[in-house]
């Protein structure tokens, strides 16, 4: 159980990608008063947490309403995770140089959604809630991952100064390698479930 909990926290934290989001976050909050930046980060992480927790409790209903099988969701989630992992390991040119022109304080979009609670994180939570009917561990993992994500983003300016963009990029690539392995395992599990387990 502790191992499964830590694995879920690690996967969620990699999907939230706080280190990779620091440069974009700093650009988005450039026009926000320094005294407000911490509150914005706390608020947006809270909104993202509520959305992820909502997907925990409506997972079964959503799958039934869309007539999706667990195997289809697992394979799709694995493909999404793999594509995200590849982009983390081999980032697109110019990604760190994006400078959004925002004079107003961002609300929900684009920080809470999709920067924090993106499609991959939502799909992963949905799939995990389907696999394990006991939601306490998943809820706990979400809260811990969001808390860690919040702490890292709050320290974003200091981390950017300490490691610089090359250091942050190196750590993000390392996380991408871990996520690639998780995505491949998810694909293997989904294919086995779809074609060899008779489901």
Image (tube, helix red, strand yellow):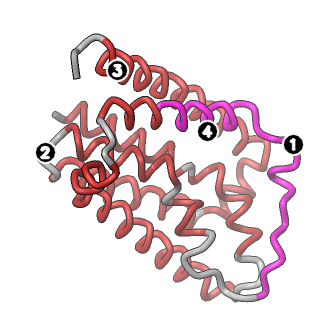
Q: Quadrant of residue 8?
A: top left
Q: Which mark is residue 189?
A: 3
Q: Which mark is residue 93?
A: 1
Using residue 87 as the reference point, say whether residue 154 is left or right of it.
left
Across and down, in percent, residue 105 comes to 66, 86
**Disc 4: which residue:** 84
Vertical placement of 16 versus 191: above or below?
below
Crowd rating for badge 3 (residues with CA inside 10 Å; few <14, some 14–19, many 20+): some
Q: CA distance from mark 2 to mark 3?
A: 18 Å
Was residue 3 drawn as part of the magenta stretch in this picture? no
Vertical placement of 66 versus 68: above or below?
below
Q: CA distance from mark 2 to mark 1?
A: 42 Å
* Residue at the limit of the structure toward the left, as seen here: 134
Across and down, in percent, residue 171 comes to 64, 38
At horizontal 53% and vertical 36% (from top left) the residue drawn is 81
Q: CA distance from mark 4 to mark 2?
A: 27 Å
Q: Quadrant of residue 144?
A: bottom left
- Which residues lie in the magenta part? 78-103
Across and down, in percent, residue 133 comes to 13, 45
Q: CA distance from mark 4 to mark 1?
A: 15 Å
Across and down, in percent, residue 89 comes to 69, 31
**Disc 2: which residue:** 133
Using residue 108 as the reference point, say whether residue 156 is left or right of it.
right
Label located before the other in sequence (4 or 3): 4
Asked which secondary structure carries label 2, the reply is loop
């Amino acid at each position: 159980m502790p191992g499964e909990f830590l694995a879920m926290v690690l996967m969620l934290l990699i999907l939230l990608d706080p280190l990779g989001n620091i440069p974009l976050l700093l650009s988005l909050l450039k026009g926000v008063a320094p005294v407000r930046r911490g509150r914005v980060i706390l608020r947006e992480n809270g909104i993202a947490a509520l959305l992820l927790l909502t997907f925990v409790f409506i997972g079964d209903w959503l799958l039934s309403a869309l007539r999706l099988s667990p195997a289809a969701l697992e394979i799709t989630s694995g493909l999404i995770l793999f594509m995200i992992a590849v982009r983390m390991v081999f980032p697109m040119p110019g990604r760190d140089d994006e400078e959004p022109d925002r004079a107003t304080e961002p609300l929900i979009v684009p920080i809470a959604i999709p920067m924090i609670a993106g499609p991959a994180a939502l799909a992963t939570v949905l799939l995990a809630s389907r696999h394990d009917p006991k939601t306490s561990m998943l809820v706990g993992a979400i809260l811990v991952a969001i808390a860690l994500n919040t702490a890292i983003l709050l320290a974003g300016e200091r981390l950017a100064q300490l490691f610089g963009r090359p250091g942050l990029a190196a750590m993000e690539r390392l996380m991408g390698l871990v996520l690639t392995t998780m995505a491949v395992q998810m694909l293997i599990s989904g294919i086995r479930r779809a074609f060899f387990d008779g489901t």
